[in-house]
Image (cartoon, rainbow, N blue to C red):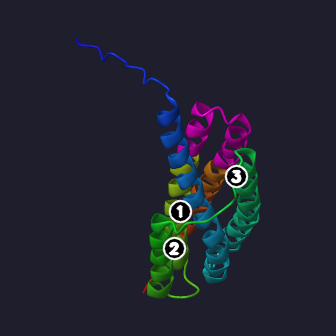
Amino acid sequence: MATKKQTKVERTPEVESALKELFVDELKDIYWAEQHLVKALPKMMKGATSEELKKTIEKHLSQTEGQVSRLEKVFESIGEKAKAVKCEAMDGLLKEADELLKETEKGTEVRDVAIISAAQKVEHYEIASYGTLRTLATTLGYNEAARLLEETLKEEKTADSLLTEVAENYVNEAAAAETE
């Protein structure tokens, strides 16, 4: 059985600079994403039928507002100005969420399933983004940034788990029982 030989990349100033540039670009991307999620979550909450789902979204809205502030601290900790650059991925996910709201009937559990689906797609994108950012921060020696990003990563994983609980504990079965 062949084993892969790991090669270490020599950490030159050019490599560090390129990696930092990628890190900052990714921060700008998620900063835009979180700012726009703050605007989108109230629509999802308003469209939800289940009180449990509304409360879960409301809690995450509050966390997301805190995450925007935390990202500003991450920028500050690495000596950069907080700046948002359009996140095409989040833009697409939020457009899809809007479409799901339009395509499902108000006051139905099926709509709640659609909202949970859209919200979990957002959470999974955020989990991937924050995991990558935390790892890059660690690699670059930005310990404070890594700590802040880890805090947000944990919140995103918890939000995803809570959405799964809402779906599994009530919403999916209630939606399955609905008739057209």
**Residue 129 percent across, percent down from the top left:** 53, 51
Say which label, 2 or 3, has the lower sequence index. Answer: 3
Residue 153 magenta-highlighted: yes
Q: Secondary structure at mark 1?
A: helix
Say which label, 2 or 1, has the lower sequence index. Answer: 2
Q: Main secondary structure of the magenta part?
A: helix
The residues bearing labels 1 and 3 have C-alpha atoms spaced at a distance of: 22 Å
Q: Residue 167's image quarter?
A: bottom right
Q: Residue at x 50, y 26 (%)?
A: 11
Alpha-carbon neighbours of circle 2 within 10 Å: few (<14), some, or many (≥20)? many
Q: Decide if residue 35 is on the left or right side of residue 77.
A: left
Q: Give amino acid for label 3.
A: Phe
Q: Assess whether mark 3 and mark 1 are in contact (beta carbons under 8 angstroms).
A: no
- The residue lying toward the viewer, choosing from 127 and 144, is 144
So how many labels did they put on this image?
Answer: 3
Q: Residue at x 32, y 15 (%)?
A: 5
**Residue 117 percent across, percent down from the top left:** 49, 66
Q: Decide if residue 159 is on the left or right side of residue 85.
A: right
Q: Give amino acid for label 2.
A: Leu
Q: Residue at x 71, y 67 (%)?
A: 61
The residues bearing labels 2 and 1 have C-alpha atoms spaced at a distance of: 8 Å
- The residue lying toward the viewer, choosing from 41 and 137, is 137
Residue 18 magenta-highlighted: no
Residue at mark 1? 122
Q: Is residue 138 above or below residue 116?
A: above
Residue at mark 3? 75
Q: Which residues are magenta?
A: 131-154
Answer whether residue 119 is visible to the viewer in this image: yes
Residue at mark 2? 94
